[in-house]
Amino acid sequence: VWMDLRNGNRDIYLYDLTEQMPHAIVTDPSWQIRPVISGDTIAWEDWRTNNRDIYFCRYDPATGACPEQRLTTHANEQVWPAIHGDRIAWLDKRNGTWDVYVYNLSTGFEERVATAAPGTFGAPNFWPPVAIYGDTIAWRGYQNGRWDVFVAVRTPAAGTWSQQQLTNDSAEQLGPSVWGSTVVWQDDRNGNWDVYLYDLTTAMERQLSPRL
């Protein structure tokens, strides 16, 4: 999936590799941007209501249809969706600060994962600020004049999220991504942008990119 300007504004398109055909997912006259996909579920940031909301749809490869649904309806802004399986996470300003929210499509349950307290998000206009894999969400937060990487892990039995700050370097860390118990990000601590990894199981950090 990608954002496409062929109609003179920002729409969402999909390419089906099996049938080798592109499909228009959303062609509303307003902007639809920052699409993400997991399986047959597509989520994006949508500007049609004069503020930014999160929409999603489930793609049917048999028909090419993807009936859209509005996920957030608050008057303030919701931006930068991330998706894995039946969970969609995003940044949300309904409380006046950029918080992290997640919605479970299977249960219809929405949760606030993190408030601005462990890191004020600022204006999230560059680099994907949120990533999700299963019960783990990572994000970049701005505090003490720099960007750091934070993570929250959900305990299913308790239904609670435990938060942790992964980086505390004087340089900036951006663009977190998560898979399983591993979080990676871009890191400027060596004076150029390297890739670092943190293993949540072993609580060990290491540099992946070579030192140049």
Image (cartoon, rainbow, N blue to C red):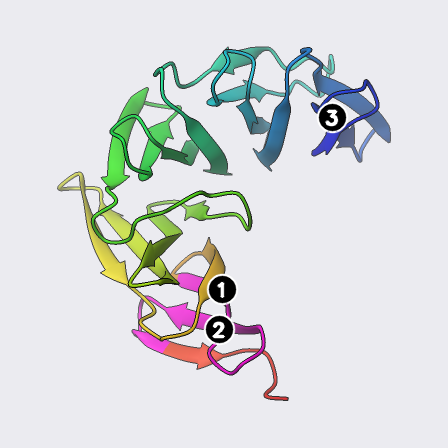
Kindly identify the residue that appears in the image at 48 percent across and 23 percent down: 52
Please state which amino acid type lies under the numbered disc 3: Tyr
Q: Toward which corner of the image does residue 94 lie, by quadrant?
A: top left
Residue placed most toward the observer, 89 or 203? 89
Are discs 2 and 1 less than 8 Å apart at CB?
A: yes
- Crowding at dot 1, Cα within 10 Å, few <14 / some 14-19 / many 20+, comes out as many
The span shown in magenta is: 182-204
What amino acid is at disc 1?
Trp
Disc 3 crowd, CA 10 A, few/some/many (<14, 14-19, 20+) = some
Q: Nearer the viewer, residue 123 or 177?
A: 123
Residue 135 versus residue 198 in the image, above or below = above
- Residue projecting furthest to the right: 20
Residue 188 can be seen in this image:
yes
Please report the residue visible at 45 percent of the width from the left and 65 percent of the height from the top: 173
For the image shown, how many numbered marks are present on the structure?
Answer: 3
Residue beneath disc 3: 13
In the picture, the disc for residue 185 is 1
Q: Are marks 3 and 1 in contact (CB under 8 Å)?
A: no
Give the residue type at disc 2: Tyr
Residue 196 locus on image (x, y percent): 48, 73
Q: Where residue 14 sits in the image (x, y, percent)?
A: 73, 28
In the displayed structure, 84 sits above or below 202; it is above
On residue 196, the disc is 2
> What secondary structure is found at the residue carrying circle 2?
strand
Q: Earlier in the sequence, mark 2 or mark 1?
A: 1
Alpha-carbon span between mark 3 and mark 1: 27 Å
